[in-house]
Amino acid sequence: MQVSAFVRYGLDGTFVDDPHHESGVGFRRSIIDVNEFQIAKALLAEHTELLSQEVDSRHLFTMCMQFGHEETAAEMLRQGVPGCKVEAFHLGPYALQPKFIGEPLAVSLREGCACRLRWTTCRSCSWGFDPGSGVWMQDWYATVEDAQWFAQEAAARPLFRTIAEALRSGHGIPDSLTDSAKARVLDIAVLVGDVNLVHRAKLIQRRPLRRWRWQDFIYMSKDLLVGWVQDGLDVREPDILEAALIAGNSFEGLEGGEAYYRTPLREAVALSGHPGPGLEFWNAVRDLLMPSSGQQSLGRYNNLISFLPRICDAHSAYEQVVAAKEAGLHVDQFGKCIVFLDCPSCQDAGSAVHLTLLDWSIYRGLAACAELCAGMDIGPSWWTAWLSTQDVALPCLKCGARLEVVFTGDDPAPREQRQAAAIASVRAALETSRQQASVEMGVGLFQSLRAWGRETAVSRGLLVRLTAQVLAFAAKRPAIFEDETLGSMLAR
């Protein structure tokens, strides 16, 4: 069989007025399609060497892709026809270029990235990899939402399915792929959230480069009643984020949110409400997200407890605070804003009370969370003792009249639960202080007392009790005891 049998010739509409041309004077005769039937027969007969020969200096694989016969091209690649060359543009489609350089105004109001077509990055976007070792994707400017849609289309096509099948079967990525095509394979695997395929493709040397934005991964909601409050964070596209991290993307320094509190991506994931109690997603990616190198000093008054969407749930509040602390957040500085009506007695204007995380844990009767706060040595506020021992209606700071709460976000726990949470926090603070003293001084103190005991014939049991008593006196006074009323009332 001649190799010319694999193609179809015809007049392509180009008029040639050259008597020395092979087509003579008239319309040019050229390849207008491939003969799929003949190629299929050759594939069944395993005539791979014949199929590898070029026709008019063009490989049959390239012509199959050009004329829209992708299934035939994929079969040639699967059977290892020599000379097949897969380019990045074969693994399309790609997202379209935006008409405007900037994002809509809503993005800038959320303090996210609005770079789009600029070749620089801001605090809210990242290329993911070192540009010097990567390959720019054709739609590098696209949002994750747009890029994902087109990547799903590309992943469903025969050529990519063939490449993915080779990777999953352990044969590795075919040598017929160019560096840019290999990077595109990893790019598609990330964008469709295929973690298993990413694990097999992440050994590719050249990395796909695209703009990753903070707002592509994190959705920030705002409270409509108190407009300046950053009310909650949630993870967008968790599968893509996990796959991108497994592929080796580095999002260190990627941050967004309100100007008064820029939230790094790692912290935002820890604070998010996804996927629910148990924090499975956070546990899956916590070791892949690099901690932020910068430190923020929070103001005395803030509403950052709103960041913790499950802080009011007794079953998950403790887990979320632990996760936030492990992520590097200054949860000991988080506060909660409670707004009151005008004082009915002295007509004082409405005011906002700022509670600490310890106050809020007591307010909601969260004993485990209150113990954790005490262990972090969160001191009491002006309201801590009142929330622990009195009715929830707080007094006016001027005349002492009861103020009516108009916005808290959640109802208070019964007084018995609040008192139990406060007592638990005091006990936890004492225990933490004693443990710290034991770690710092326990061994040395016991050895000194034991040396003294040898001379005075004191029993070992007495030495242990003496050591415990001395450490109890030497322990640092917990911050919660700054409130004398609270300490004397609850430490009994």
Image (cartoon, grey):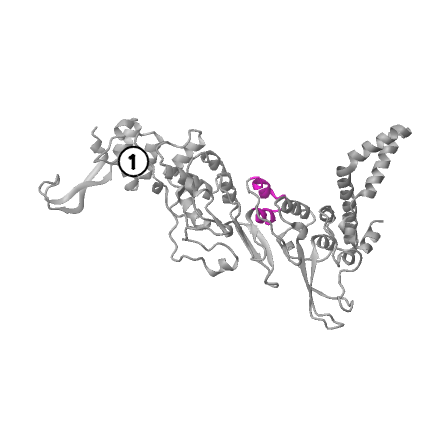
Asked if the stretch drawn in magenta spans residue 376, the answer is no
- Residue highlighted by disc 1: 61
379 to the left or right of 297: right
Magenta residues span 266-287
Q: How many marks?
A: 1
Task: Choose top left, top right, bottom left or bottom right for residue 16.
Answer: top left
Residue at 19 percent across and 41 percent down: it is 30
Q: Secondary structure at mark 1?
A: helix
User: Which of 484/315 is in front?
Assistant: 484
Residue 472 in percent (x, y) is at 82, 42
Task: Choose top left, top right, bottom left or bottom right for residue 224.
Answer: bottom right
Residue type at the position of mark 1: Phe
Residue at 76 percent across and 45 percent down: it is 428
Residue 287 in percent (x, y) is at 57, 39
Asked if the stretch drawn in magenta spans residue 270, the answer is yes
Residue at 75 percent across and 38 percent down: it is 440
| Mark 1 neighbour density, 10 Å: few (under 14) some (14–19) many (20 or more) | many
Quarter of the image with the N terminus in it: top left
Residue 397 in percent (x, y) is at 75, 66
Q: Residue furthest left?
A: 19
